[in-house]
Image (cartoon, rainbow, N blue to C red):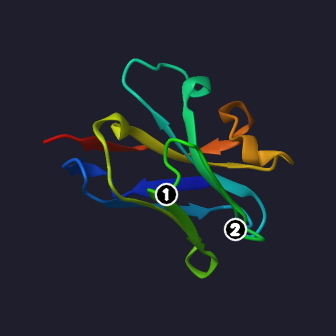
């Protein structure tokens, strides 16, 4: 049974930093791509989640949404079955519930939420003074 568990969310002031973790089990952690997505309040469906960043757990290739380039860094530790999203210079518009998800799709770099096979439960991030 595939499980993804996020942690690390919380309240942070604008300009602050936060690191999210996603620990996986029940699948070969060297194979799929793992993405971080976010869902702002008012978005109801999984298909409305915005792709933030994605990493191939095998070769380590990474991709970022334009809105977070230069501020967010995705990384992985295969020995710990864990991926991370290090977020810096956070802005109020980064406020959302952040989800990790895995996909086996070939063109995973498009970060299409409809192609995510398994999701975690989400962790909330609030950027506010």
Residue found at x 55% / y 54% = 4
Residue 78: image x %, image y %?
63, 76
Which of the 4 image quadrants contains residue 49?
top right
Residue position marked by numbered label 1 in the rendering: 70
Hey, which residue is sitting farthest left in the picture?
129
Q: Is residue 81 left or right of residue 92?
A: right
Q: Quadrant of the N terminus?
A: bottom right
Q: Provide the secondary structure element on which disc 2 rests.
A: loop
Q: Nearer the viewer, mark 2 or mark 1?
A: 1
Which of the 4 image quadrants contains residue 48?
top right
Q: Provide the secondary structure element on which disc 1 rests.
A: loop
Q: Is residue 120 above or below residue 46?
A: below
Cα separation between marks 2 and 1: 26 Å
Which of the 4 image quadrants contains residue 71?
bottom left
Residue found at x 12% / y 42% = 129
Residue 115: image x %, image y %?
74, 36
Residue 80: image x %, image y %?
55, 77
- Label 2 close to label 1 by CB (< 8 Å): no
Residue 16: image x %, image y %?
25, 56
Q: Is residue 27 left or right of residue 38?
A: right
Say which of 11 and 90 sits in front: 90
Say which of 100 and 66 sits in front: 66
Residue position marked by numbered label 2 in the rendering: 29
Residue 119 in sight here: yes
Upstream in sequence: badge 2 or badge 1: 2
């Amino acid at each position: 049974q595939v499980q993804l568990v996020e942690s690390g969310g919380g309240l942070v002031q604008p300009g602050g930093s936060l690191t999210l973790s996603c620990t996986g089990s029940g699948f070969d952690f060297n194979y799929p791509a793992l993405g971080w997505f976010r869902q702002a309040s008012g978005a109801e469906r999984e298909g409305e989640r915005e792709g933030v960043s994605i990493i191939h757990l095998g070769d380590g290739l990474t991709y970022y949404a334009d809105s977070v380039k230069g501020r967010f860094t995705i990384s992985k530790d295969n020995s710990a079955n864990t991926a991370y999203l290090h977020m810096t210079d956070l802005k109020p518009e980064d406020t959302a519930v952040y989800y990790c998800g895995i996909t086996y799709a070939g063109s995973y770099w498009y970060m299409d939420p409809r192609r995510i096979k398994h999701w975690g439960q989400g962790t909330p991030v609030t950027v506010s003074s």
